[in-house]
Image (cartoon, rainbow, N blue to C red):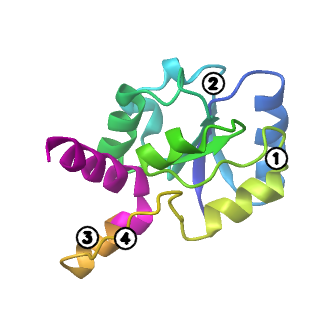
Amino acid sequence: MTAVVVAIPQPRADELAAELELEGVVVLSVVGTPAAVGAELLSGAGAIIVPASRAVLTADLIATCDRAGVRIIALGGADTRLLSRLGLSASLPPDAAGWQVAEALAADPEPTTDRTTTPSSSSSAASSSRWPHAVGLSAASSTQRS
């Protein structure tokens, strides 16, 4: 069973939280803005649901989620380059139903990036499938240094 934090604007946040609970997903917290998300709020969460926008998907949010081992599920937004650069899976529709989000939570994350990487060990393969945004950031930073 996955536990999530829903960090999207109201009134959709409460609606999605109720839909997710019907799907068997534990909703730990509903916050109207991802800016209010800190490590303590993510404690026990497996994922956070946020809008797919540059204003939300900041380096601070990504780093907080990486440190907490929390997967990011993005809703809406058409900026696939941003998601790719961050190593995030493709976003779901902005009005995605609870069952769609539950399916995305249950699925193995597929980053939107076209880069192919060869994991050096099975532990790095596990972390890249669990938190793909961490892999995207390290790959992007190593590309920028070259």
Does residue 19 lie above or below 34 as drawn? below
Front-most of 30 and 56? 56
Location of residue 43 in the rendering, given as x and y in whole percent from the top left corner: 42, 41
Sequence-first tag of 3 and 2: 2
Mark seen at residue 96:
1
Location of mark 3 (residue): 124
Location of residue 144 in the rendering, given as x and y in whole percent from the top left corner: 22, 41
Structural distance between the alpha carbons of marks 2 and 1: 18 Å
Q: Amino acid under label 2?
A: Val
Q: Residues within 10 Å of mark 3 (few under 14, many from 20)?
A: few
Q: Nearer the viewer, mark 1 or mark 4?
A: 4
Q: Quadrant of residue 60?
A: top left
Q: Residue at x 37, y 32 (%)?
A: 39
Q: Residue at x 62, y 35 (%)?
A: 52
Q: Amino acid under label 3?
A: Ser
Sequence-first tag of 2 and 1: 2
Q: Secondary structure at mark 2?
A: loop
Q: Secondary structure at mark 4?
A: loop
Sequence-first tag of 1 and 4: 1
Sequence-first tag of 1 and 3: 1
Q: Amino acid under label 4?
A: Thr
Q: Residue at x 42, y 30 (%)?
A: 61
Proximity of marks 4 and 2: CB atoms separated by less than 8 Å: no
Q: Residues within 10 Å of mark 2 (few under 14, many from 20)?
A: some
Location of residue 94 in the rendering, given as x and y in whole percent from the top left corner: 78, 38
Front-most of 135 and 29? 135
- What span is colored magenta in the figure? 128-146
